[in-house]
Amino acid sequence: MREKPQAMKAHLANHCASCPEDISTYWHKKLTEKINQYTRRLLDTEVARVTNTIYSELKHCDNLTL
């Protein structure tokens, strides 16, 4: 698995029965943090896109009622 470090990390975190528990826990936390950061970036990007769309629509509307 040398060519795929992410696969090795996931294996150590989730599947390796011979891996010490502290190592497994360490990689599980690291992978969880990475997933959370990725999800947060996706959410931030989507919020920015929606906000820009709303502002763009507001610029084109003279009489908008919410």
Image (spheres, rainbow, N blue to C red):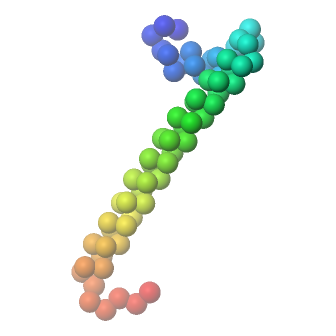
Residue 5 seen in this snapshot: yes
Q: Residue at x 44, y 47 (%)?
A: 41
Q: Residue at x 73, y 13 (%)?
A: 20
Toward which corner of the image does residue 47 lie, by quadrant? bottom left
Residue most extreme to the left: 60
Give the total number of marks visible in the rendering: 0
Please state the horizontal and vertical placement of residue 58, each as a whole percent of the image: 30, 79
Q: Is residue 34 left or right of residue 13?
A: left
Residue 16 falls in image quadrant: top right
Instruction: Tell me the quarter of the picture where residue 53 sits.
Output: bottom left
Residue 26 in picture, x, y percent from top left: 65, 24
Residue at the image point whose x is 44% and y is 87% from the top: 66
Question: Picture coordinates of residue 45 (x, y %)?
Answer: 39, 53
Q: Is residue 14 visible?
A: no
Q: Residue at x 25, y 79 (%)?
A: 59
Q: Position of residue 43 (x, y in %)?
A: 47, 53
Q: Is residue 51 above or below residue 57?
A: above
- Compared with 32, 18 (above or below) is above
